[in-house]
């Protein structure tokens, strides 16, 4: 389905002139069983189709089916959308939709004072209040006094709206989220068609369920339109963001990463063998790629993460591009095999969708605490390139870059993303694939004087001869190899030479990556805020606001974590102070201090949430002094 | 004009120039020779052949084969082999592992490569000891094995590799002996001919750390009385004059050892080997007790679709359904909108 916004009449046909807003943050919160993630993604989709810029933050519990009504079973989805460029999911919601007491209990604190609270009163009774930990009803005891509260018996109105379809009580209650979605679509002048299309597809097997859910959406929408609560339910519109012309789609980090890997494979002229073992939040990538067999992608759900990476290395040995993916605990298991890929000098892409650690940690919450593990975490002197993506859309480019470096330098590459990027959505200008530079792999086929460790003098990459080719039969393995012949060698000098060579090969990649740019601001000033990964949005916004206040602050956002861009140290020298906000205990700050002897100031947060712009603003102001 | 008769390939054609570094007298030498001879007999294309191994004395094997070879990490060879087959199903992949490599650290991977039925040959060199790390007991060491890590004798019960393979769902299970230069190539050829994961346990003597553990049935003199060579369609007999055999005790659903001509036993009482019978296979590999022989040969062979074959089938199907699948289409999939 393609929509052309330029030719489209105004989305809303309502008579009254809606209040226009620059941007709005809405958080949908309810029980895991209430379908809040679906409500959120459908609202997002509809919003994106209208050309509004947006960023989202899905936040769900680790338990698959936590007991109904409990606070730890609350699932939330936050969207920030607006007429200006939106870079974060928003610090504080302007609107909170709470589907039950537990959702209110866990989310009310986040709501802006004076913000709008939409609450399903039908879900409030003695039992559910007690389950959420309330001793008195917050809707009556003054708890919600600081907010504009819209009390609606959504449960009853949903039941009413789907009565004619003869659903069971349980099925009917499941439509609550669609009723709520309908209401919110009305409030913000979003169109309903994409939701209707999606419901028809989702319930293709049951006309009854499709009709009921659509009726619920329409009923919620109609309620907004006709309610006599005009004072409460004022209709807001959010305009279109001023974005560059082009064709857009919404995309999550996991989706764009999958597309980037496939594109990288095509640009290299290689099939992809993706070995993985399920783990949150990395599994999404496995699911995405498993559906792309017609694009030369084979996925292998291995018995564990070790088998996953080993199968990928085996595939690379045989001439495919091996790719493996996991999160921290699984990446830890892959360490020994990474060493083998490093010493046998085989291309490999290792994706780490970081999450809270250590051990199982916070599986569904985001963190960037695996940087040490990525750069340093192997036995022996085992260097490999590390690159990090910073937005959902950026995952596409970074994935292609990972493939390019892996095949050009015959090395494993670690690609760092995180749980937030994997699940968050943003509008994405669809790239022009034909405009991308191919980097076709040339396998070594010449049998004359063949040695598997003959190197390209410039890149130091060894050649790549694959089974099936006569005359280039060779044996490789983890034991140290002779620099010339590639045969086993225990010679001391040779080990020194090989270690140095592997090291220099990786460091040499710095000559082949773009110089670091100042992401925002001037090349000199009082402070530079250095970030990497998914903190891009909040840092950008904070630096922008600080600059507007007149502070001499700039931003540097790094993609190439190892080796670092050649000019990074020089750039840092242009500033009085260096501030490094990270969702960990200061890992990149350590790397910067180690490499450049700079007095990097750490700003660390590991509460499973993205940085708040307001918090960053405050720290920036304090640091500038 | 003289017509050049093609030279018959020999074991030497598959040997590398690398110095073989096993201890003198190690059973691995004999296995290497048998494998090289097998490839020569099969006229295997070295360019299309890959030897993959884990870590251990046995896992040094690929360095000595003039084919493609990958000496990987401890226990994980099955996963590498799987990846190789998924990348290029046409390759002929042989995996070499040890009792420690395949059944301790790599037990899980071995289980899954067998269960998935990846089309490779798996040679497990069982010397009932960790050779490379200087002689600690292994999962196949018999209880009471004295070793540096079990000076008072090991107190663990030992694992039966073929029984493990059968339980894992292997569709080809065979056994042979390192020094049996006639038997082994035959078994290896059968393994090679089988489509799917072929599991071959090879009793291998570690002369340094576990010498003669198998001597009671591998010694030339003892072999006829103590080894039973199973062959499909033939009676399960052994002994110097094939006078002993296996009979099914129907009351106990167990196998008993009988002598033809004694107690009215005739040849007709002896079980006929059916290599497609999983229950029989299990009884043969676990045969135990007084007078019980060690069963060697192809014990189970019952092919089903291979994993790599199934994957290739799904890929073909997907490609046939979308013959023009290209990147652009993929990028523009779903709902898009145009700005400007
Ligand atoms: C991760 C790891 N752990 C331990 C070792 C040490 N190690 C090497 S081989 C081996 C045991 C080998 O036994 P087996 O597989 O029976 O091979 P054999 O030497 O007897 O042929 C051990 C424990 C290792 N190389 N890697
Ligand atoms: S230690 Fe044993 S298995 Fe290893 S090479 Fe020596 S004899 Fe062979
Ligand atoms: Mg052993």
Image: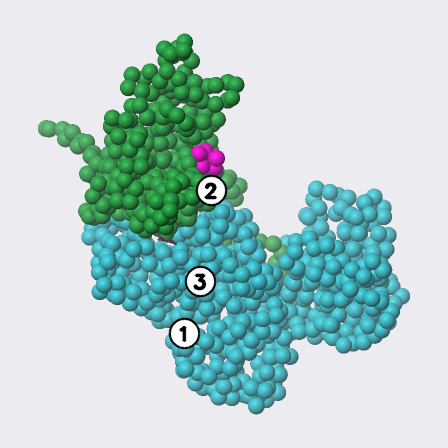
Chain colours: A cyan, B green
Q: What element carries label 1?
A: loop
Which residue in the structure is indicated by mark 3? A414
In contact (CB < 8 Å): disc 2 and disc 3: no
| Alpha carbon separation for disc pair 1 and 2 | 43 Å
In the rendered view, would you say A6 is above or below B79?
below
Marks 1, 2 in one chain: no
Q: Looking at this view, is A55 or A83 the one in front?
A: A55
The residue wearing badge 1 is A565
- Please state which of the two labelled residues, at mark 2 or mark 3, is closer to the viewer: 2
- Residue A284 position, x and y percent, is 56, 55
Distance (Cα) linking label 2 and label 3: 27 Å
Was residue A144 drawn as part of the magenta stretch in this picture?
no
Name the main secondary structure of what is drawn in magenta.
Answer: helix
Judge by depth and name the residue closer to the eye, A421 or A512. A421
Chain letter, disc 2 residue: B
Q: Distance between the residues labelled 3 and 1?
A: 16 Å
Q: Which residue lies furthest to the front in this view?
A: B152
Residue B137 occupies quadrant: top left
């Amino acid at each position: 389905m393609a929509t052309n916004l330029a030719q489209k009449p105004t989305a809303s046909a309502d008579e009254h002139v809606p209040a226009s807003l620059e941007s709005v943050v809405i958080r949908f919160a309810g029980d895991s069983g209430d379908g809040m993630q679906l409500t959120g993604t459908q609202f997002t989709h509809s919003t994106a189709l209208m050309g509004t810029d947006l960023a989202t933050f899905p936040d769900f519990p680790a338990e698959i089916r936590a007991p109904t009504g409990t606070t730890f079973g609350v699932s939330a989805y936050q969207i920030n959308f607006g007429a200006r460029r939106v870079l974060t999911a928003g610090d504080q919601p302007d609107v909170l939709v709470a589907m039950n007491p537990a959702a209110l209990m866990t989310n009310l604190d986040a709501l802006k004072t004076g913000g709008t609270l939409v609450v399903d009163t039908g879900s409030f009774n003695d039992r559910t209040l007690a389950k959420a930990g309330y001793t008195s009803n917050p809707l009556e005891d003054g708890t919600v006094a600081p907010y504009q509260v819209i009390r609606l018996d959504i449960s009853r109105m949903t039941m009413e709206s789907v009565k004619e379809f003869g659903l069971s009580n349980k099925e009917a209650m499941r439509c609550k989220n669609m009723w709520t979605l309908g209401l919110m679509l009305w409030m913000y002048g979003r169109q309903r068609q994409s939701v209707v299309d999606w419901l028809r597809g989702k319930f293709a097997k049951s006309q009854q369920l499709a009709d009921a859910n659509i009726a619920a959406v329409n009923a919620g929408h109609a309620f907004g339109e006709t309610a006599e609560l005009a004072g409460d339910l004022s209709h807001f519109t959010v305009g279109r963001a001023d974005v560059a012309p082009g064709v857009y789609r919404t995309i999550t980090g996991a989706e764009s990463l999958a597309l980037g890997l496939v594109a990288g494979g095509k640009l290299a002229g290689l099939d992809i063998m993706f070995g993985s073992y399920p783990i949150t939040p990395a599994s999404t990538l496995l699911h995405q790629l498993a559906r792309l067999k017609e694009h030369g992608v084979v996925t292998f759900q291995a018995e564990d993460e070790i088998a996953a990476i080993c199968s990928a290395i085996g595939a690379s040995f045989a001439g495919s591009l091996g790719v493996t993916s996991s999160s921290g605990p699984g990446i830890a298991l892959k360490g020994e095999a990474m060493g083998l890929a490093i010493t046998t000098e085989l291309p490999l892409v290792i994706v780490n969708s970081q999450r809270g650690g250590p051990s199982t940690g916070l599986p569904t919450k985001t963190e960037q605490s695996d940087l040490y593990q990525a750069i340093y975490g192997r036995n022996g002197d085992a260097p490999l390139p590390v690159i990090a993506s910073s937005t959902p859309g950026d995952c596409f480019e970074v994935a292609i870059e990972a493939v390019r470096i892996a095949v050009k330098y015959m090395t494993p590459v670690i690609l760092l993303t995180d749980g937030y990027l994997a699940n968050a959505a943003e509008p994405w200008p669809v790239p022009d694939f034909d405009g991308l530079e191919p980097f076709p792999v040339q396998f070594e086929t010449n049998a004359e004087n063949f040695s598997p460790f003959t190197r390209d003098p410039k890149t130091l990459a060894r050649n790549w001869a694959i089974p099936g080719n006569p005359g280039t039969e060779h044996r490789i393995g983890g034991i140290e190899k002779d620099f010339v012949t590639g045969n086993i060698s225990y010679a001391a000098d040779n080990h020194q030479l090989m270690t140095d060579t592997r090291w220099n090969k990786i460091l040499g990649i710095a000559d082949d990556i773009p110089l670091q740019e100042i992401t925002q601001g001037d090349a000199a000033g009082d402070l530079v805020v250095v970030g990497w990964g998914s903190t891009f949005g909040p840092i950008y916004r904070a630096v922008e606001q600080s600059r507007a206040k007149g502070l001499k602050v700039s931003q540097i956002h790094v993609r190439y974590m190892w080796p670092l861009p050649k000019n990074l140290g020089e750039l840092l020298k242009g500033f009085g102070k260096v501030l490094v906000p990270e969702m960990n205990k200061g890992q990149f700050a350590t790397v910067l201090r180690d490499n450049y002897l700079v007095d990097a100031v750490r700003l660390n947060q590991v509460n499973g949430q993205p940085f708040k712009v307001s918090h960053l603003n405050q720290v920036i102001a304090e640091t500038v002094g | 004009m003289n017509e050049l008769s093609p030279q018959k390939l020999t074991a030497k054609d598959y040997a590398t120039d690398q110095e073989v570094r096993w201890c003198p007298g190690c059973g691995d030498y004999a296995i290497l020779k048998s494998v090289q001879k097998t490839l020569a007999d099969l006229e295997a294309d070295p360019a299309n052949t890959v030897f993959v191994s884990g870590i251990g004395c046995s896992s040094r094997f690929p360095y000595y084969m003039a084919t493609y070879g990958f000496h990987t990490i401890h226990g994980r060879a099955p996963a590498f082999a799987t990846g190789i087959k998924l990348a290029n199903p046409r390759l002929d992949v042989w995996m070499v592992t040890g009792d420690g490599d395949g059944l301790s650290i790599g037990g899980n991977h071995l289980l899954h490569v067998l269960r998935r039925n990846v089309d490779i040959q798996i040679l497990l060199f069982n010397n009932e000891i960790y050779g490379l790390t200087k002689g600690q007991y292994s999962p196949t060491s018999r209880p009471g094995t004295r070793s540096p890590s079990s000076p008072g004798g090991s107190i663990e019960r030992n694992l039966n590799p073929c029984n493990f393979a059968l339980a894992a769902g292997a569709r080809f299970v065979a056994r042979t002996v390192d020094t049996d230069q006639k038997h082994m190539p035959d078994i290896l050829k059968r393994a090679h001919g089988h489509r799917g994961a072929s599991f071959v346990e090879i009793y291998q003597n570690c002369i340094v750390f576990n010498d003669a553990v198998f001597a009671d049935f591998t010694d030339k003199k003892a072999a006829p009385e103590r080894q039973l060579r199973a062959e499909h369609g033939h009676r399960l007999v052994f002994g110097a004059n094939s006078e002993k055999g296996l009979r099914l005790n129907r009351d106990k659903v167990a196998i008993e050892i009988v002598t033809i001509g004694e107690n009215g036993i005739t040849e007709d009482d002896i079980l006929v080997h059916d290599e497609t019978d999983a229950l029989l296979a299990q009884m043969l590999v676990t045969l135990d007790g007084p007078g019980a022989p060690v069963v060697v040969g192809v014990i189970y062979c019952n092919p089903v679709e291979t994993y790599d074959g199934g994957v290739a089938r799904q890929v073909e199907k997907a490609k046939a359904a979308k013959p023009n699948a290209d990147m652009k289409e993929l990028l523009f999939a779903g709902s898009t909108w145009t700005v400007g």
